[in-house]
Image (cartoon, rainbow, N blue to C red):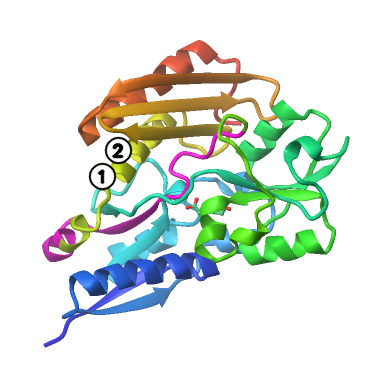
Amino acid sequence: MQQTRHIGTRGSPLALYQANWAKDLLEARDPETDWQIKVLKTTGDQIKGELKDFGGKGLFTRELEDALLDGRIDLAVHSMKDVPTVGHERLIIPALLPREDPRDAFISLNHASIDELPQGALVGSASLRRRAQLAALRPDIRFCLLRGNVQTRLRKLEEGLCDATFLAVAGLNRLGQSARITQAVPTELMLPAPAQGVVGIETRRDETDLLETLKTLNNSNSEIAITAERAFLRALDGSCKTPIAALADRAGTMLGFRGEVLAKDGRLRFSCAEGRDVTTVGEAYDFGYSLGDELRTEIDGRITFDD
Ligand SMILES: NCc1[nH]cc(CCC(=O)O)c1CC(=O)O
């Protein structure tokens, strides 16, 4: 008899795109199984204000993980940048898909780049990291909240609610909206969020058959890079209330890593950049974690991690 497996996802167009991508990959690996998409609402999708006011961690993923634990779904597809660094003991993410462009996109109708934003321009972003990084570059910029899925935010920009906004290049590329990118911001100017651009598939640890299938979809460059980035994040904070950025890039066995922590107003910035020979996931974790730990010592209370 044919087995049905449910792939849980959020309902946003990007989440649906990513879930369908996972479904296609799974169908190619295992055409015997009936792979079905099941849309669930997450707390993060219903919030209108600042995410940090709602307790931060796991807003976009908790409902999917609850559904995995009680068997409503068998797989959950996540943007890894939304996934907390400490997972549930009964769950595992055995498949990290190939990374899309990790950069942030600057989007504006009238200004060609961040540099060309006029004095005192209004930027719409709910992201603490992007706000702090931009404030560090351009202290004159003012901010407003701009939330909602990618399409909603682009529409609000067109309605003139602000002069510019930022979105992940990855999401825009996946949605076929690359033409909307005004400037792919160099990572030297704006370091991305840990794991930006990587999609992961989560399942229950005891699903031996699913684990086998999922492991064949895992991309080791994605895994090594985001393991280091997420370990860095974990060493520093888990609250989502401090602006933290990290990007690891693998060339052969050399893993290049850059990370930074900022004060919310962008006036303090602590960063690190280092390369190390890394061949295993464990080494990638230790590398990222030790860099985060060193940075925390250097920060020495000058940036708070929990207010
Ligand atoms: N927090 C929402 C979120 N989670 C992942 C992405 C983009 C896709 C990705 O990073 O893989 C986005 C939207 C955005 O930042 O533009």
Q: Name the residue under label 2.
A: 224
Amino acid identity at mark 1: Ser
Relative side of 193 to 274, left or right: right
As drawn, the label of residue 220 is 1
Is residue 133 in view? yes
Q: Do the residues labelled 2 and 1 touch (CB within 8 Å)?
A: yes
Amino acid identity at mark 2: Ile
Q: How crowded is mark 2: few (under 14 residues within 10 Å), some or many (20 or more)?
A: many
Dividing the picture into quadrants, the one containing residue 152 is bottom right
Residue farthest to the bottom?
Answer: 1
Read off the magenta span.
190-212
Q: At 76% across and 35% down in the image, what residue appears?
A: 115
Q: Compared to 250, does 61 lie above or below?
A: below
Q: Compared to 75, does 93 lie above or below?
A: above
Residue farthest to the right?
Answer: 119
Q: At 74% across and 42% down in the image, what residue appears?
A: 113
The percent position of residue 190, horizontal first and vertical second, equals 60, 34
The percent position of residue 156, horizontal first and vertical second, equals 77, 62
Local secondary structure at mark 2:
helix
Local secondary structure at mark 1:
helix
CA–CA distance in space, label 2 to label 1: 6 Å
Q: Compared to 191, does 6 lie above or below?
A: below
Asked if the magenta segment contains residue 191, the reply would be yes
Q: At 51% across and 71% down in the image, what residue appears?
A: 11
